[in-house]
Amino acid sequence: MAEPRVIVVGAGPAGVRAAQTLVKAGIRPFVVDEGRRAGGQIYRRQGEGFTRGYDELYGTEADRARDIHETFEALAPSIDYRPDTLVWNVAEGRAWLSSAGETEAVPYSALIVCSGATDRIVPVSGWNLAGTYSLGGAQVALKAQACAIGHEVVFLGTGPLLYLVAAQYAKAGARVAAVLDTSPFSARIAAFPQLAAQPDLLWTGLTLTLALKRAGIPVLSGVTPVAIEGDPETGVQAIRIRTAGGSERRFACDAVAMGWHLRPETQLADLARCTFAFDEGTRQWLPVTDADGRSTTPGVYLAGDGARVLGARCAEVTGELAARAALADLGHPGDADRRRTLLAAKADYATFARGLARAFPWPHALAAAVADETMVCRCEAVTAGVLRDSVSAKGAVEANRAKAFSRVGMGRCQGRYCGAAAAEIIAAARGEPVVQAGRLRSQAPVKPLPVGTARSGR
Amino acid sequence: MSSPVKSDVAIIGGGLMGSSAAFFLRRRGLSVTLLETDKIGRQASGTNFGNVRRQGRPIFQLPLANRAIAVWRQAHELLGSDVEYLQSGHMRVAFRDRPENIGKMEDYAKVAREEGLELELLTGNALRARFPWLGPDVAAGSLSAMDGHANPRLAAPAFARAAARLGAQVCEDTRIVSAGKVGSDFELMTEDGRAFRAGAVLVTAGAWAGKITAWFDEPVDLVARAPTMSVTEPVPYAIKPAIGVMTPEEVESVYFRQVARGNIVIGGSTRAQSYPDEYRAYVLPQNTMTQFEQIRRLAPALARLNVIRVWSGIEGYTPDELPVMGASPLVPGLFYAFGFSGGGFQLGPGVGETMAELIATGTTDIPLAPYLLSRFAAAGPRAASLHDGSRNPLGEVPLSLSKETRGG
């Protein structure tokens, strides 16, 4: 290698800003992205042949989306770009890429992981029926393929994405049967001062809620999900909930989109052997980084929602910060003023994110109380009862032991969707704080890898 | 310091050997303390392939393997817990480019029959008719219908729980850092200052056993390795026997089995180093790739499946890759059972039952001479390479025969 190779994983807002920063410094980064086109989940492009404009696709974020897309397109001659490519493992200073049935180990001097986030899920009785999607999945269907997940959709969960996706569905002409938020309205009032750190984002949120209500869509706060109803043949038919007032309500629907805010995709950081710490505010295990995004593993940097969920706008800031940290560590001169500006911006977004976590709390008590018959791990069909049995009868003391005994988190998604709830159930069964349940260790491959994978001839 | 915990037998190492020994010692009425540094069965015992196969072992191991199979067959009722034992057969196959293996299979089958192990040799159309998914390079198969496989994650913990129900004291997160004699008793000290006393000590500490035997002036050089394991997404259950390649080359020695849930567990080929002091073992991605190449040669259709997870654990190999088992020749009351990596899972319950018998009665019908630690003292320094199939301390069968199904 003539010059140090810097690999950027992910081409969402964090990855694009990281790549841009590296190119400006004269480095030709290697950008690997699972997506077919840059933009990440938030600024995901529509498929060929679709003609919707930026405003229609990205609403209030249209300018940002366009800027990310155009910035990346302008970088094309200055980067090595691998779209449609998964980094399935990291070991011994090499990133293992997989694409079109081939794998290639690419050595790096610096690895900037901008791996994004997925929905955090609370299992609900019946959530394994066809027609249940994550909020993110529901949004992707609309954004990329211009289709809705159903004719009559209920949105369940909490967090800004709940209202955003519901509003996008309503705008696109889908019938939104209800928006059901598990957070009490009082939490939003209490979080108001922190949310005011980003006045325009707060305004956007309020506008969305108002628009939903104006459209006559029931928008309920403080709900407790009871069950998604339906049958295995036809899928979802209705959802039953208990309102904040304690009465039971039923909404007929043929699809449910659910999500309780987001969780970072941390498998690569884990495979790179980064240290993790428990974050009390969000009840999540997060990779430890310094303010600039350096992980505890030398040469590995973390940015965007994949490090800590601070939102798409902040991802642009942390992407640049991480790239600057990598450049500094490679001996490039720094820019103290720019760094200060970026850190200040990040601090504001972090305040706002704390406000969101307070306004839309992870309903841990709900997760811990999931009924025995309810499926927790959909990949391996593990119910809450089987999981509790692994604790009470088989003596599992933490998540990895419960996984060994019950198969929870052992399937295709490796616990990325059930892990958060499983930890709450394990901790509750043992009468301990959730931090004691630990976290599921990540195991390669990051996503399923074909046995037919051949070594690349590159 | 609190007063020491006393028992008839203290077992150092809560893998499958230690856990099953604890269970069978309690059945014989001896008081037992099972001491485990980490969690029961988390390393080699919990991360191996899960083969419950007798064939392919050195012939001297068959009496022990036969004793073990009897326990596996009644494990569910004996332990009150399902360890997913499936007596669905085990087949070793030979590739065309190693034609000498077919003769070796025939020779092995003859000797094995005398030890009560029936093997059916299949070649040509008969082989393809029954196992149409085998690759074109496969020339012959040796099928043991009465072998099978089980779930390693569940087995050792199930034995330890059953032992605890019978009154054994099971101590996880208990690291022994020194051992010595106080009068006729052994005294074991933990890292955090607890003391355990026992009239007899059984060392079943796997990769860590060498450290403990050295305290008693019987050092043994163990190599800590990390097997390469993978599992696919579930597909309809169709492949009954566990399949393994017979070869003297580690790189070719892959094996797979389908569990009732449908996933296909793949093991073997090149191993990595493991780190017993850190309690960590990592799968190297290049080893996963080599394993995929080899498994495609064995069963090409598996190429279409996705692997959803890889893992490893800490194995401990003796200089000849064969186990150590029996009473210490130097220290009365001290017993050993370790170095089973590469083929210990099937033997586990037999080892536990035999060691319990030996400790309780002073004798056993299982011939233990080939297992003694003293063989290394006689052999001198590590003379042979790990994969030199020519070295065979025990006569009867070439050692290479034992290598096609490591991790089982």
Image (cartoon, grey):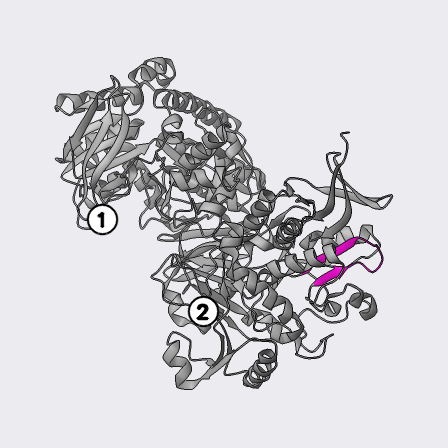
For mark 2, does the 10 Å Cα neighbourhood hold few (<14), some (14 to 19), or many (20 or more) residues?
A: many
Q: Is residue A451 magenta?
A: no
Q: Which mark is residue B241?
A: 2
Compared with residue B124, is residue B67 higher up or lower down, i.e. above or below?
above
Q: Which mark is residue A353?
A: none
Chain of the residue on which disc 1 is drawn: A
Q: Position of residue A391 (x, y in %)?
A: 49, 38
| Residue type at tag 2 | Pro
**Left or right, residue B204 beside residue A288:** right
Chain of the residue on which disc 2 is drawn: B
Looking at the image, can residue A1 be seen?
Answer: no
The C terminus of chain A sits in image quarter? bottom left
Q: Tell me which segment is drawn in magenta.
A: B324-339
- The answer to whether marks 1 and 2 sit on the same chain is no
Tell me which residue sits at (79%, 43%) in the image: B178
Looking at the image, can residue B360 be seen?
Answer: yes
Tell me which residue sits at (17%, 41%) in the image: A150
Give the mark count: 2
Report which quarter residue A172 is drawn in. Answer: top left
- Reading the image, the residue beneath label 1 is A47
Please, what secondary structure does the residue beneath circle 2 have?
loop
Which of these two is toward me, A174 or B13? B13
Residue at the far right: name it: B183
Q: Position of residue A129 (x, y in %)?
A: 25, 43
Tell me which residue sits at (68%, 74%) in the image: B388
Q: Is residue B327 magenta?
A: yes
The N terminus of chain A sits in image quarter? bottom right
